[in-house]
Each structure stands twice: as structure tokens, then as C-alpha cells.
Image (cartoon, rainbow, N blue to C red):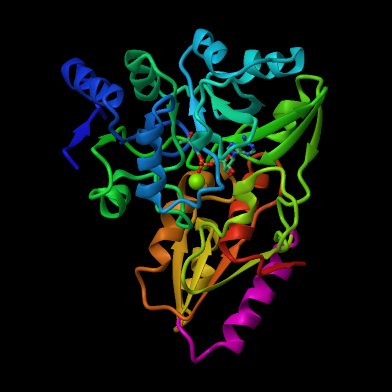
Amino acid sequence: MKELIDFKEKIDKDKLEEVCKSIKDGSVIVFPTETVYGIGANALDKSAVKKIFMAKNRPTDNPLIVHISNYDMLDKVVSNVSKYEKILMDKFWPGPLTIILPKKEEIPNIVTCNLDTVGVRMPSNKIAINIIEKSGVPIAAPSANISGKPSGTLVTDIVDELKDRVDYIIDGGISDIGLESTVVKLDNDVVNILRPGAITKEDILSTGLNVVLDKHLFKDVKENEKVASPGMKHRHYAPKVKTILVYSNDEKKEYDRICDIINENNNKKISILGFNENKEKYINKPNVKFMCIGSKHDLNSVAKNVFTVLRKVDKYDLDLSIIEGVEKQGIGLAIMNRLTRACGYNVIEL
Ligand code: TXA
Ligand code: MG
């Protein structure tokens, strides 16, 4: 890494200029967005994009999202936008929504892994927008993490993981949302949600469009099974230790089941990833380490914390990790999607 740049308080104009020039010269940078941090490079530069795949150890069949800062850039990247896609752009851009669209030739095949579509997003984070605008090129950027790990939302975690693999890291503070963007693909006026995020199913329904959840959001992909988004096939977010997700809308039922698991494993070291409100119930158990994932009355706080806490699990010497689930509504759907994958589909729903 050439430099860790601090833009938390304000964006330094000279530094911004330096970074954007180096993007045009083929550098790879870590930069903040409102969802999670991205590892970005000029989307039109094949060899720069190749460096992203290498920095992340990313499977070469998993395409990258292209980030734009204005609609002229969109025209350079995609060949067609339907009136339904336009509705989504008008309502949710700039913001945490990625739309899969037919790609133009100018986007190199390495970005899209030879698909004829490209995922496009106009982020709302001020630093991200400034970087794209000043560079004057669309920026291909997956989440800032080594493939398989939780997406980076905190610069200290990202520096540990990626400092030797990128040119610049820009600190914009902790990510506002904490989960990656909602990814959608349209089939006429039907919006298929390929990855849930902060733009929720309910938000999209409010535009009058129809919504379908992809069948793989909560189900493992079998070998050779066809998927709508390559990312669904890859193992993600998982701590090394065995992890179980437990959820019931009946709190007592959920607590009793978790206690059963704790008792069955009384010779093991266990972490509970749970809500602040439930801390008192667990902290006196001798074999349990409680790790707070936020407040059950504020799922946005859970979204913001969840990747940071998942990363922490592996820092302790544990045998088992149990996560308290949330209702699959609003942003709860995205939280449960990431947690289901984090525990390798090891889910108890009561
Ligand atoms: O919030 C976000 O989306 C962050 C920030 C940096 O913008 N980026 C991000 O990128 O999460 P990544 O690469 O970690 O996830 C992109 C997802 C992957 O699951 C990928 O398979 C899917 O989008 N994807 C990309 N292009 C696609 C395409 N053409 N068709 C279907 N799925 C696509
Ligand atoms: Mg990712």
C-alpha cells in the first residue's frame, strides 16, 4: 500500500486528485461506499480489473459491480434501460441498489465474467461519488475483503487484510449501512431480488412493481445447479468455527432452544451473537462469551454491526458459535440471508 488516506472529516482536494489520477493509471484502491467498502479500479482497464480479482483471490466466474456517478456514464456502460428499470433508478439512485442490465462492448469481459449483462450501481456516499466523478471513469468494485470473508465495513479490519494487495486505502469511517447493496434483475415489470439489502422488498413494492425473491436466498446451491447470480454459489461470510443460527418469533422458545444447545455442549467454549437486550440472560453462563450484534428494536444497528462481529468470532478460541436470528422483514431479510450463509445453512427455525 502506498498510503492510507483519511477522508473521515473532509475530502482533501489534492489527495483526491492524486488518487483519481492513479485510478486512471491502473491502480487499485479501497474506498468507502454507504453499504460496505469496495476494492475499485477503472472498469474499462482490463489489467487493472485483473488486479482486483488477484487482490481478493476472487473466483474468476464471479462478476463485479460497476459504479457510476451520473447518467452519461450509465449510457457508456449499458445498451438498454427499460421503463421499469428507470422507475427503480429514479426512486433509489444514488443508493444501495444494483441493477443487472445488458452490457455494452466497452465493458471488458473480465468485469462481467463473460456474461452479457453488467451489475450497475450509483452509490450515494460522498467520497465514492467524488472519486468516480473526478476519475471520469466507471469503477468496477466488489466488496473489500478476501473472497469468502465478511465484507469490509471498518478500515482497521480492511488494512489488516488488504494492505499488501492494494495501492491506496481511503478511510471514510464505519460504513453507514453495513450490508452490501440489494441486487435486482428485471423480467418486464417483475423485479427479481438476487441479493437482499437495505433497499427492501417492501421499498420496491411501493413503486408499484412486482417482486419475486430468488429461490436461492436461503437455500444452498447444488453442484451444477443454475443460478441467477454467480455470487450465490460461493461460500461467504463464514467464521471458521461451527456456527448455528436460531430463530423463532416466540422469544421464549428461541431462548429455551439456545439454552438446550448450551447445555448439550457444556464442555465447549461457545459464543452467543445476540441482541443487547438479551445480554443479561447469557453473561452468567460459565462456558459462554456474549457478543452483541445490536438492538432487536433497531435492525439497522444489527445490519451495521453484523460483519464486524462475524469477523471477531475467529479472534477467540471457540468451539461453537450460536447466532440469534431476526424476522425476515424489511432489512431483516438481508440480515438473515447473510447469517444463513455465514452458518453454512445450519439453521434452526422454530
Ligand atoms: O454494496 C455493494 O454492492 C458493494 C459495494 C462495494 O458497492 N459491492 C459488492 O460487490 O458487494 P460484490 O462483488 O461483493 O458482490 C456483487 C454481487 C455478486 O454476488 C455477483 O455475483 C453479483 O453481484 N453480480 C455481479 N454482476 C452480475 C451479473 N451480471 N449478473 C448476476 N449477478 C451479478
Ligand atoms: Mg462480496
Tell me what residue is drawn at x 51 percent, y 48 percent: 60
Q: Is residue 149 magenta?
A: no
Tell me what residue is drawn at x 54 percent, y 18 percent: 77
Left or right of residue 76: residue 328: right
Tell me what residue is drawn at x 53 percent, y 19 percent: 94
Along the viewing direction, whichever of 343 and 68 lies nearer the viewer: 68
Residue 48 x/y as whole percent: 35, 34
Q: Does 108 sit above or below residue 195?
A: above
Left or right of residue 159: residue 297: right
Tell me what residue is drawn at x 64 percent, y 16 percent: 79
Left or right of residue 257: residue 165: left
Q: Does 340 sit above or below residue 175?
A: below
Residue 99 x/y as whole percent: 63, 27
Task: Give residue 160's quadrant in the image.
Answer: bottom left
Q: Is residue 303 visible?
A: yes
Q: Is residue 298 visible?
A: no
Quarter of the image that includes the C terminus: bottom right
Residue 195 x/y as whole percent: 65, 42
Write down the region rendered in magenta. Answer: 249-269
